[in-house]
Amino acid sequence: MITGLGEPGRLPIHTWWFVLAVAILVLNDHVLKSMFAGTVHGIWTGKLSGIAGAVVFPGLLQWALVCWFRLSVLTATRVAVILGAMLMCGIETLPTFVDTVIAVNQLVLDASGLSHVFGPVRLVMDATDLVAVPFVAIIWFATLSRYSAASAGSHMETQSLPTALAKA
């Protein structure tokens, strides 16, 4: 089992593909969606945001839980993946949840003074975007692979996903 705090520098947010997911999310949400609004290609911008967001949100949450709240890497990964999937499902299917997420995001932007940079928060419910939910598992598998490769010969041992969940 992966135990202890571990080294936050080995979390997936420190990889090239995580940085790529952030870049895709920013480019898609601030350029491509406005370019392709109302076209056939506009359908795919929502899916692209969903997939990139399914990697970015759990990755950032995992990092925050490890670094700020001092959770073990395994616990932080479980929480991040579960909350990431729940958030995505809520945003795509529950209108009241969408309104709450928009209000909280706008509050954070207003409090940080970034409202003029990012503009108003907009979320569009689209149940077909749920196709991106399984991508939250990328953070889970990336964490296990990074820690199992780094822990060879150390005090940390890894185990299969079903075994790890059974012991939780």
Image (cartoon, rainbow, N blue to C red):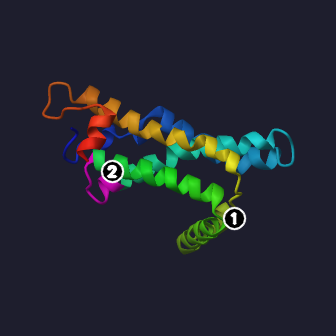
Q: Which of marks 1 and 2 is nearer the N terminus?
A: 2
**Residue 22 visible in the shown view:** no
The residue sitting at 81% across, 38% down in the picture is: 41
Say which amino acid is labelled 1: Gly
Query: Which residue is tagged 1?
Result: 119
In the rendered image, the vertical position of residue 17 relative to residue 97, given as above or below: above
Left/right placement of residue 45 relative to residue 84 reads right
Q: In this view, does 105 lie to the left or right of 146?
A: right
- Residue at 68% across / 42% down in the picture? 47
User: Which segment is the magenta one?
Assistant: 65-73
**What residue did someone put label 2 on?**
76
Frontmost residue, 21 versus 82: 82
Residue 87 place in picture, x, y as percent = 53, 56
The relative height of residue 93 versus residue 74 in the rendered view (above or below) is below
Horizontally, is 65 left or right of 46 in the view? left
Coordinates of residue 24 in the picture (x, y in percent): 62, 40
